[in-house]
Each structure stands twice: as C-alpha cells, then as structure tokens.
Image (tube, rainbow, N blue to C red):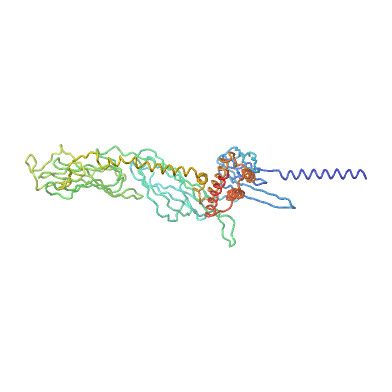
Amino acid sequence: MHVTVKHIVALAALLFFAFTAGAQDSDAIIFEATLSKNKLGINERLRIDFSMNKDGDNFNPPNFEGFNVVMGPSQSISSSWVNGVRSYSKTYSYVLMPTARGKFTINQATIVIDGRTYKSLPQEVEVTAAVERPGEEASADAVADDNLHLVAEVSKTGPYLNEAISVVYKLFVSPSINVSNFRALDNPKYNNFWSQDMPVTKYSVQNGVYEGKSYRYVILKRVVLYPQKTGELEIEPLSLEVTVDVPTNKRDFFGGKIYTSTNITVSAGQRNINVKELPSEGKPENFSGAVGDFNFSVTTTKNQLNASESLQAKVQVSGKGNLKLFQLPELVLPSALEVYEPEFNEEVRTTTEGMEGTVSNNYTIVPSFKGKYPIPGISFSYFDPKTEKYRTLNSSEIMINVVDGPNSGSGTTGVTSNYSNQKNVELTGDQFNFIKTKPGLKALSSKSFFGSPSFFLWLLLPILLIPMAIIFGKKREAIASDHAGNRIKKANRLARKYLSAAKKTLGNKDAFYIALEKALHNYLKAKLKIETSEFSKDKIEALLAEKQIEQSSIEDFISLLKNCELARYSPFSDVQMQEDYNRASEVISQMDKQL
C-alpha cells in the first residue's frame, strides 16, 4: 500500500511537469517561411508563405532577388477556440515567377511581435530549364502567349534613301480569348529616320489571317518613315503590356465558361531595313535630294504693271514624295527688280504611302523703272524610285512688262537682262509707315527737387514712422506674453508639419494610412526621443501613461494606430480617411500641450 501511494505521487508529478511544458510550448511564438517547392522550372511559379501564431506589426518581406512578384502579398487570418484553448494563425503569401536559371536564396523576412523582432530562416531555391507538364492544364499566361501576337508590317524592306516606307502595328487576337486593356511599355525611337505619326483615332476590330489561322485584329499605330542614312537600319520594336481574359476548364451555374485575367508583355520584334544609295550615274548638278513623283511650275500674278507696283512670283513643287526634305530652286531676277525674301508655304498631308501635296516659295517683286524684264526659266530635278531614274523639269521664261514709270539711268526702255548687281530687299517692317502730322512733341524743362512736394514728403516721413514703430512693438509684446495662445499655435503648426505627407495622399487608402502611421510614430520619436515604430500598442499606451497624458488622448492615439493597421486589409471610405486625418491633427495638438 505504501508503494502504491509513492507511485501515484510520482505519476502526478510527471503529469504536472508535462502539462507545464506543454503550456510553455503553446505560448512559444513561431514565425516561419514555407515554400511550395524547392526546385522548379523557369516556366513555373513558386508560392511562399510567411506564417506566425501571434499577431504582429511591421511585417517586412525580403527583396525576392531573382524573382518577379506575380501576386501578393495576400493575407489570411484564422482563429479558433477548442476545449478552452485558443489557436491563432496569420499568413502573408506571395506568388513568384523566376527571372533566370540558377540557385537563389530567399532572404529573411522580419516582423515585430510583443515588442520583439522575429526573423524567418533563409530558403534555398533551384530554378532549372523550362519543364513539360503533361496532363496539366496550361497556365493563363501560356494560353495568352499562344493566342496573342503583335506584328509590325513594313511596306518595303529595301527602299532608296529618302523614299517613304510605312510601318503598321497590328495586334492579332484569337477568338478564344479577349483583350480588356493595353498600354505601351516601350515606343520605338526610329533613329536615322525622319518619322511622321498618323494617329489612330478609333480602334476598329477587323478579321484577318495570321500564320494560316483566323484572327481578329486592330491597328494600334501607323507611322511613315523616310530613311536618312544608307545601309542596314534597325526599327526598334514596340512593346505592350496587355490585359487578357483567358477561358478556364471551369463552368458557371448556367454552363458558361469561367474566364481568368492575366497580364502579359508582347513585342513586335526588331525589323531591319536595307536602305539603297541613290545612283550616282545621271545625277543632275542641281539635284537637292527630292525623291518621289513631282510636278514643277513657276507662275506670276501679272505680266504687265506700272513701276512701284508689285507682283507675286510663285515657285511650286507638287506631287508625292519627301516634300519637307528638300530645297526649292531659287528665282534669278534682273537687278532692276526689287525682290523681298520669299514666303514659304506648304500644304502637305501624310498617308501610308508617304507625303503628298504642295510646297512653294512666294516672291514679292517691285519694279523701279519702265521697261521689259525677263524672268529666266529654272529647273528642278528629282529621283523617281519607280523608274529608278532622275528627272529634270524646266520652267519657261516669263516676260515682265513695266509700262509706266521713270526710265533707268541708261535711258533705255528695251529688254533689261542685267543680273550681276541684283540685291534682295530686306523688309524691316516700318518702311511704309505714314508720316505723323501730329508728333505730340513737348518742350524739355527741369524742376528743382528742393521745395517740391517730394522734398517735404521725405522730410516728414521719419516723424510719421515713429508712432507706427511704437504700435508694432506693443503688439509684439502682447503676442509674446500670451503663452497659452502661443502654445496652441505651436501645437497646430507641429500637427500640420507631421501630417503634411498624409494630407497629400487623401483618397489613396494604402498610401494615406502608411503616411499617417509614419507621422504618428515620428511625432512620438521627436517628443519622447525614442523609436516607437517597433513597439506594440500596449507598450506605447503604457509609455504615454507614464508621461501623464490624458486617457482620452491616449485612447484616440491608439485607435488611430489600429485603424492604420486595419486599413491594410479592410476597405475605408474617403469620409473615414478625412475623419482620421482631422482626429490625428487634434490628438497631436492635445498631446503636445501635455508633453
């Protein structure tokens, strides 16, 4: 009997120690990282979970070097009571896509729990070459890649120098997927080309064929290029980020397909153009770089006039080609005709075939003497890429007959053809102003400063300033003696200072509450000279109580911190954000009066 009692006592002691050890283990804080797999192909995705068994603050993930974050952080919380024992779990999850092959280390994440910082263990991951996944449903990205294509269609890959080519960018979409949005990531620079965009004002869906399959397509961008350099030139690719809705194997209640959305990047690819040099054989001496198919003319508004009257002479080139990229030939006029700098006009529009329209120089000509003056014909040369030959167009001679006016110094009224001393007249803008009949001139006079009104004003000014200085000094003394008012003003300025960043982000929930939480901690750091960002709310509350802050102010301050944390995974309205901002401003002002 005595032995049995001893056995019962020993058993009870063992049970007590086991229960105590179990209670201690259940109170232990756990923060760990878990991988969905330690080895994956470069075409696969990796999931990593950071889990803890007690709520914490200031979770800081690693930088995920070697991976792109496809999704996350997503947050899940579970809490339950079983037989009076509470279990709690909080998890931050990320989905990662590897960017290269090799072995990578996912570094530590950190979190603050009960005022202490906990770190997860580093995780090793090996990324191999792309793997086949037979029998597995294709990913949304893979389906989108196979059914979405961006194509750059170039009208001609072997143009001559300054010959127009067009590039049309088309987005081909398979009927099995839908595109909901897109944006340009990288626009081509078109180096060594003269370029002209043709804006697409409306995206019209059309039916077409790509690699033998039926597709829908839209034209996204059109541009006309004129190569300015010979040899092999590169057209940089256009890249887009496209949001695509991809069907899955799942069905809804009515049997319709369920779609999933994904973002992918598509590129038109780099295109190479081999630009041919213009032939040197048969090139005219007056060739100025015109390439295309043109007409040329020289016309005047009148052929007969009086001296000192004016006429207009127009040198015009029309047709299709690089109309903005060459110089028009100049008129050669007799020296007896005054000519002003020509006015350049262009009426050019751009199509996918290049520029077409008219360019011209308009000369204003004023004869000074009576007589007949010939305007000799001039020539214009261009290269026609269709016939691959040069062509020269000539204008006819135009005779200008000045019927009335003074004779020239030589006294002759015959045909004048002296071109050697011709000078262009430069228009200054005031040559033909009217003579003023009432100039409004005034007699010059001088007045003495002494005895003037200005003299007496400066003399009395110091006397007038003395009472103003006395009033200003008394006002400053009154402001300085109002200690309570000054303290309130200082507190309000301090609140505006710390909350300025939060005010700028009102309306953006995530950015606003991050800035608000930072402002609250920065205020405590400035006033208490300690870092509180890693403190729990209970410790901050105790710290403020030690400083004899009113309980209502402490409760408001802690409530704001809780709202900042709650906003990470709960919706908040603009009205709630404005209320929290106003409450934070008031709390900081009230606390500053007590610290």
Residue 242 horizontal/vertical position (percent)? 49, 50
Residue 311 horizontal/vertical position (percent)? 17, 48
Residue 536 horizontal/vertical position (percent)? 63, 44
Query: 2 or 317: which is nearer to us?
Result: 2
Residue 247 horizontal/vertical position (percent)? 55, 55
Query: 216 or 446: which is nearer to us?
Result: 446
Note whether 455 is above or below 136 in the view shown.
above
Q: Quadrant of the C terminus?
A: top right
Q: How many numbered marks does the figure carry?
A: 0
Query: 483 or 356: which is nearer to us?
Result: 483
Q: Is residue 512 left or right of residue 464?
A: right
| Residue 141 in view in this figure | no
Q: Quadrant of residue 469?
A: top left
At a point 59% along the width and 60% down the height, the residue shown is 252
In the current view of this chain or complex, which residue is farthest to the bottom? 254
In the current view of this chain or complex, which residue is farthest to the right? 1
At a point 44% along the width and 53% down the height, the residue shown is 218
